[in-house]
Each structure stands twice: as structure tokens, then as C-alpha cells.
Amino acid sequence: MNLGSLITGSLNDTLAVSLPLFRTELCLATTIVLVLLCRMLPVLRRLDSGIVALGGVCFALWYAWNDLRGNPVGGLLHGGANGGGVVRQELFGGLLVFDSLTAYIRFLLMGFLALYIPFTKASGIPDHEDGADFYTLVLGATLGMCLMASANHLLMVFMAVEMASVPSYALAGLLKGRKASSEAALKYAVYGAGAAGIMLYGISLLGGLLGTCHLPSMATEIARVIDSGSASGSVMVLALGGLMMAVGLAFKLSAVPFHFWCPDVFEGAAAEIGGFLSVASKAAAVALLLRVCFGLGVSPTGINAAAVANLAEPGLAGLGATRHFMVCVVGLMAAITCTLGNLAAYGQTNMKRLLAYSTIAHAGYLMMAVAAAVALIGVDPAGARDAVSAVAFYLGTYVFMNLAAFAIVAFLRNQLRSEEIESYAGLVRSSPGIVVAMAVVLVSLIGLPPLAGFVAKFLVFASLVQAISLGAERPLMLVLLVVGGFNTVISLFYYLRVLKVMTFDPPPADRAGGEFSLVSLPGAVVTALAVPVVVLGVFWSGLYACAQLAGAFAS
């Protein structure tokens, strides 16, 4: 192929296929430019950067919704061969991939931003002066998170993680003049730089050994290396490279033992920043974990029922060993992460630190379902789809649960001038509405019926039960199921302790703030976030149908 044909082919692929499926990210990029112009040009400084950002996000949300529905754009077929939704399409020469998981996570992130921006406007952080800088960083980080969900090449994995992380470091230090905020940003940046360096070294090991960084091609090469039974240490290098790359993923997930930054950053940063890192960053990191596990553990042609029946087929044995390694690593980290997060949360006195450890614990629950999905792909592809659907549904409910929790903390901070749990004492006497909203959110985070968190956790545990019944990594899945149930019981104590303080403890005599009414702008935001937690616990079929579209990516 000559240079002219190569350039022509690349241009045709970019303009006819890639860019039409990249509209959501293009909307975000355009919005970032407009928000920056609001900061730079004197004539535009009177514009509210939050309104400009919200308008761009609404356009991006509309495009994301159209992509999730599988509209025939750029060669997409509605109701494709992967069980409905969208057909897998590589973009920009294989650097990115568009499929049902990409479409779902994009839609989730855009929906989150559509809720998050009004929340920040109501809470007062950022102010008008810092608004353009704040929303530029938020949109830039979200753009990186969209790329994390669609990464199909290890170099793009690294670039997307860094694109999501670097703006987050700056956001953590948003509160100027506060020592705790500056320390949070510094600790976050130092941990992030270390994790990024280790991950990049792991990527170099894998790419150098396999001769490619394209995830589907890497799966083929991994199977060849393992099936050849090479005694040259190649398998050990593969394992080492995989573990080093897992460091970067675990950092984004705040999974043990790479979680140390999370409580300190959440406590030092504003509650608004904690809500963003807790929800958006978690969703993107889980999507990237799924992308890497399935990209390296499944052959480019997929695993159909006939192939599963013939496990001696060349390549399947090697990929089976790869999946076993990934299931063990992810499952072990899930059990430890969930347990440590719940145990450490028990003794916290600061509400943001408690929610930070809660975030760590929920990362463990999500990783359990990821481990079940990877274990099931070689035994029952339909079961793997259900497990991925459970992850997607969990992330959908988590948007409302955790964002509502951080919104309540932010508004109570404005009212009470404190984020300590003891400052919430007796709030039920003066502000019963906010206490009811907090009760709904915390009980849902526990996973009790009839709220959305119960359905999400039930689906995760159901995926573990399905893996056990089919004999997919049965001992490990059984351990994860027991650990998950045990940790659900543990979480009762520290979540309900907050409600006990709000309802039974006497209010302090020197309380600075007055009543918090739900008939106000902050109250409307809290209500808008808390009501879906109740509704999705009863009428959850619509969200689960969308989650099943995401699960089709495992086909």
C-alpha cells in the first residue's frame, strides 16, 4: 500500500466512521473551548460558565442517548448480532472502540454531569470567578473518562487514565487558601504519578513481549505464548506486566492496597469534588477494568457455545489460563477492598471520610461482579452478559445514591459550617426532610429493600451464584459471595450510626445554622437525587434494560 492510499483510507475511516461515533466527546471538547472563551474574552465574562457547560452537556447527552439506542449512524445497525443495541466498531485505526459498553458509560457520564452541574450551582462551589476553571477541569476529566471506557489500545489506556487524572488533581486543590485542600491535591498527584509510572512500565513489558498494544491482537499473542509452553520466562513477564498495569487500574478504582489517597483527598477536597471523583471516576475505572479483562481474555472472534464445548481448541487453553489469572487477581482485590473499606468506615467521625471508605467498599462489590463476568465468559457467555449487566445497573444506581449523599453533605456544610457527623445531632427536630433523604440514601447504600441499592447488590450476588452453579472458579466465587454478604452486615453499623446521630442524639446548644427546608433550590436538588433511589428500587426494569445493552458487549 502506497502513502497516498494509506492517507486516503485513514481520512475515509476518520470522516465516515470514527467521527460520527465520536460526537459525544466532540461535544465535550467544544464545550470546553466555549467555557474557556467565557474566561478569556472580556465580552463573554458576564456569561455564566455553568450554564454554558450545562448546555454543552445536554447536547452530548442527546448524542449519547442516540448512540445507546443503536441508531443507524456511521454504519451502525439497530439490534445487531450481539444481542441488541450496537455493533462493535473500531475507531481511529483501532485506538478506540465503540460498542454497547462505550455507549452506556457515555450516557451514564453525561447524565451524571447533567445532574452534577446544577448541584454545584446550588451549593455555591465554585463561585463565579472560578466557575470557568472548575467546569473546564470537570469536562476535561470527563472527556478522559469517556476515552477510558472506549480504549482499545494500551497507549490509549494510559493516555485516557492520565487525561482523567490530571484535572482531578487540580480539582482536589480547588479550595484556595485551605491547607487541607492543598495537601489533598499534593497527595493525590504524588500517588497518581507513582501509579502511572508503574502502569506505563507494565504496558511497556506487555507491548514489548507481544509485539502489539492493540487489545484484541494482544489476546491472540497471549494465547500463542502460553500455548507454546515457552520456558524462556515469557509467561512470568506477562504476569508481571499484567500486575503492574493493574496498579494503575486499582489506583483509579481506589482498590486496596492503592486506596490510601482516597480518604485524605475526599476529606481535604470540597464535598462537590468528592461526589465527582466518587461517581464519575468509579464508573470509568470499572468500565476500563472490564475493557482490559475482556480484551486480554477473549479472542477477537469471541467465544461461542461451540468453542466453549471444545476447550482443547488451540488458543482457548491459553486464554483460559489468562482469565484464571485475572479472576484470581480481581477477586482477591475485591474481597480485601470490600472488607477494609467497611471496617475502616466504622470508626470515622468526618462524614466525607466515611463516604470515602464507603466508596472503597462499593468498588469491592463492583469488582466481585467483574470477576464473575470474566470467570463466566469461558463457561457460559450468557451468564457473563448478565454479570456485566449487573455491573452496569450498579453503576446506574450508584450515580444517584452517592451523588445524593455528597449533595446532602455539601448543603449541610453550608448550613452548619461543619462536616463532622456529630454536628448532625438532632437534625430531625429542625430539618426532618433532609434526614429522610439521608435515610433513603444510606439505607440504599447498605443494600436493603425496597430501594435501588438492594436491586443492584442482588444482581451482583446473583452473578456470583450463577458462577458457582456453573462451576466457574467455584471456590473463589463462593468466598466472594460469603465476603459480600458479611460486609453488607458490617455496613449496617456505620451507616445507621449516622442516622442514629441525626434522629436520637440531642442537638448541640451552639448550632450555628437554622432549618434546612426542602422547599428551596438545594432542597429541590436533594429531592431530585433521592427520589430516583426510591423509584428505581420498585420500577427498575427500564434501567436494567439499558444495563442489558451494556452487557451485550460481553458477547
Image (spheres, helix red, strand yellow):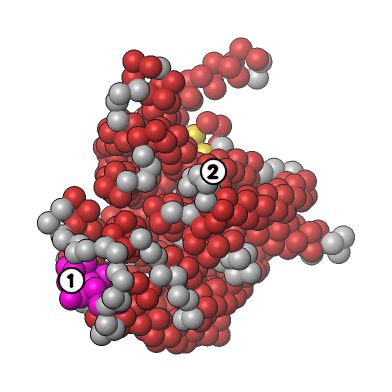
Kindly report which numbered mark, 2 or 1, lies closer to the viewer in this rendering.
Answer: 1
- Residue ID at (69%, 43%): 212
Which residue corresponds to mark 2? 170
Q: Can residue 291 be seen in this snapshot?
A: no
Q: Are marks 2 and 1 in contact (CB under 8 Å)?
A: no
**Relative height, residue 271 to residue 87 (above, below):** below
Name the foreground residue: 158 vs 299. 158
**Relative height, residue 441 to residue 298 (above, below):** below
Which residue corresponds to mark 1? 430
- Residue ID at (34%, 31%): 49
- Residue ID at (26%, 47%): 122
Q: Secondary structure at mark 2?
A: helix
Stretch in magenta: 425-443
Q: Can residue 550 be seen in this snapshot?
A: yes
Q: Crowdedness of circle 1 by 10 Å Cα count: few (<14), some, many (20+)?
A: some
**Relative height, residue 310 to residue 62 (above, below):** below
Residue at far left of view: 519
| Mark 1: amino acid | Ser
